[in-house]
Image: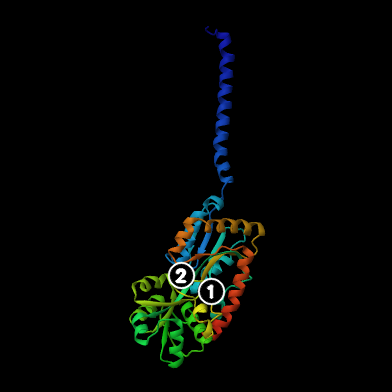
Amino acid sequence: TMLGPMNRRPALTKLAALAVTIGAIGLAALASGPALAQSTTNQRPIRLIVPYPPGGPLDIAARSLAERVKDSLGTVVVENRPGAGGNLGADLATKSAPDGQTLVMGAVATHAINPWLYSKLPYDPLRDFSPITLVAQVPNVLVINAETAQRLGINSLGDLVRYARQHPGRLNYGSGGNGSAGHLAGEMFKSQAGLFVVHIPYAGAPPAQLALLSGQVDFNFDNLAAAAANIRSGKLKALAVTTTRRASAMPEVPTVAEAGAALGLKAFDIGTWFGIFGPARLTPEMTAKLNKAFTEALGTAELRSRLSTLMAEPAPMTADQFGAFVKAELAKYQVVVKASGAKID
């Protein structure tokens, strides 16, 4: 039926009121949408500092982890802050608020070697950080130039030690510089086996590797990932890995401790590692949350596969285990760096 003039106005008024109500509900829903979305994720991304240039093992591992923890922690942005052997980026993390929003991928250099190598370090490796978890360990490998090995009849670690003892000062080894991992491994090797071998430092690992390949030096302690291709092609001969366990990437190569047990090397253990730290005074709740997210990510097939391309072994730990590990490594390298005589002012 048609509405009469007297009945039409109340109906229009009700319709207008209904439209206003619906509009208000719609605006409220629109206004609350972003707020609800924000409440379920981090309002700002977590910053994960890598104290080395892009493209290295720490950087690749950090970016892989950032991708895997998005669901549990929200966006993680990797920030490369190289400089001063890693000290610059590590120090940056210590000056951040302990709210879980700034983390750093520390390493054997920043937390165990540099404190003894640098006369002035801007941070304390134990007091100024909250350990979260170890990420991975990368074995170094004792490699000898294949032609040199054939000429001198060196086919094993035992052969190398015996030759060096019989011919003191005749063999030499190269490294990426004074205080580098290769230098410290060489000095530990010389000390424990009682050898006189000449150290030749180079300006970085690549020139040291070229010197070994060209026969300018006899052997090196190199990163397994960097040496693998030349070992497989036969240009270098792998005599032993430097960690206490054999490398899954080359299980046929013995450890220095195994192959040199009768030669004074049964306690030999030195390798590259890296892990995640927050600034000091992170709450136990935040530490536990971060540890859970990163250790679960390290257990995934994707992360294991990515780390294996770097010859790295995933090594998740509890925060307490990681703290104890760092403390032990710091004490170990105090002795090694002192024996090497390396110092940076």
Q: Which mark is residue 60?
A: none
Say few, some or many: other residues with alpha carbon within 10 Å of mark 2 (under 14 / 14 to 19 / 20 or more). few
Q: Find residue 301 and report its horizontal and vertical position in percent.
A: 48, 56
Give the number of the mark in front: 1 or 2: 2
Sequence-earlier tag: 1 or 2: 1
What is the crowding at mark 1: few (fewer than 14 residues within 10 Å), some, or many (at least 20)? some
User: Which residue occupies the foreground of this view, 342 or 228?
Assistant: 228
Is residue 340 in sight in this rendering?
no
Q: Residue at x 64, y 61 (%)?
A: 282
Label 1 to label 2, Cα distance in Å? 12 Å
Task: Pick out the residue farthest to the right.
Answer: 284
- Classify 295 as above or below 325: above
Which residue is identified by label 2? Answer: 251
Camera-nearest residue between 9 and 146: 146
In the structure shown, which secondary structural element does the residue marked by tag 1 occupy?
loop
In the rendered image, residue 272, in percent from the top left (x then y), is placed at 50, 72
Q: Are marks 1 and 2 in contact (CB under 8 Å)?
A: no
Q: Give the image quarter of residue 124.
A: bottom right
Residue 40 appears at what percent x and percent y? 58, 46
Q: Quadrant of residue 268?
A: bottom right
Residue placed at 56% from the left, 12% from the top? 8
Q: Is residue 212 visible?
A: yes
Residue named by callout 1: 244
Question: Which amino acid, by three-letter code, is at mark 2?
Answer: Pro
Assign a secondary structure to mark 2.
Answer: loop
283 with respect to 47 (left or right)? right
- Amino acid carrying label 1: it is Thr
